[in-house]
Image (cartoon, rainbow, N blue to C red):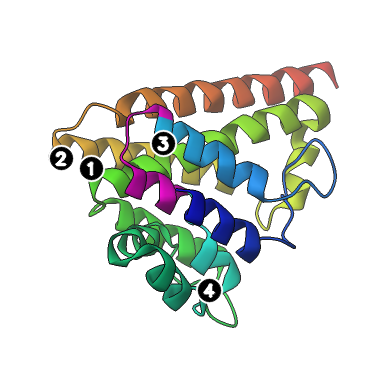
Amino acid sequence: MTRAFLLASELHARQTRKASLVPNTPYMGHLMEVAGIVLSNGAPEVAVAAAFLHDAIEDQGDHTRPLIQAQLGDEVLALVEECTEPGTGGAAKAPWRERKEGYLQQVESASLFALLIKCADKLQNARDLRKQVLLDGAQAYAVFSTGKVEKLWFYNAFVQAARQRQSILQAQQPVEPLLKAITYLLNEIQTILHDLETLS
């Protein structure tokens, strides 16, 4: 777990968080929170290690694969690859919608621990988005490559796909509580935006 933290710190050293209350917040904060959610839900060390590195290939490129394999082994690398959004890792990313549709297809065949990491990632993202929406309203979406309608579509589609997958895996724990929390936050975000539009 310590090796995963150190490798993630090295790979994401210059990366900052898009949706953040404080400008230029180190990306490691997001990775630490995701790993913390995975750990607190009873996952083994290999899953926590993969949680620290779940964005490594996607954000830092294919050259991170051999680094992860050499330092943490095949099992961690396999989980990180399961969590890597299709159409990323190369010199140029595929269009947003194409990547998200590929990601949703990926969820449909995810292993339990990959599904847990994905849910932890989306939960942490939703928490940050809620904070931003409270402060900035619809303007919170300006930092992203797509708007609130597309974001909402993706989050809802993710929850649906993840629920279907957990049903097939017959694993209510530890995934379902995270999906409930994501759904709650999405509803809160919609309510906040609606209230702000009503007031304006």
- Residue at mark 4: 94
**Residue pictured at 33% horizontal, 38% vertical:** 160
Magenta segment range? 40-51
Between 167 and 59, which is closer to the camera in this rendering? 59
Q: Position of residue 2 (x, y in %)?
A: 50, 49
**Residue pictured at 70% horizontal, 53% vertical:** 144
Q: Does the magenta stretch include residue 46?
A: yes
> Sequence order check: which comes first, mark 3 or mark 2?
3
Between 72 and 58, which is closer to the camera in this rendering? 72
Q: Are marks 2 and 1 in contact (CB under 8 Å)?
A: yes
In terms of secondary structure, where does tag 1 sit? helix
> Sequence order check: which comes first, mark 3 or mark 1?
3
- Residue at mark 2: 169
Q: Are marks 3 and 1 in contact (CB under 8 Å)?
A: no
Question: CA gap, disc 3 to disc 1?
Answer: 18 Å
The image's mark for residue 38 is 3
Question: CA gap, disc 2 to disc 4?
Answer: 30 Å
The image's mark for residue 165 is 1
**Residue pictured at 33% horizontal, 65% vertical:** 73
Q: Where is residue 107 in the image (x, y as percent from the top left)?
A: 31, 51
Q: Of circles 3 and 2, which is in front?
A: 3
Q: Is residue 120 visible to the viewer in this orientation of the structure?
A: yes
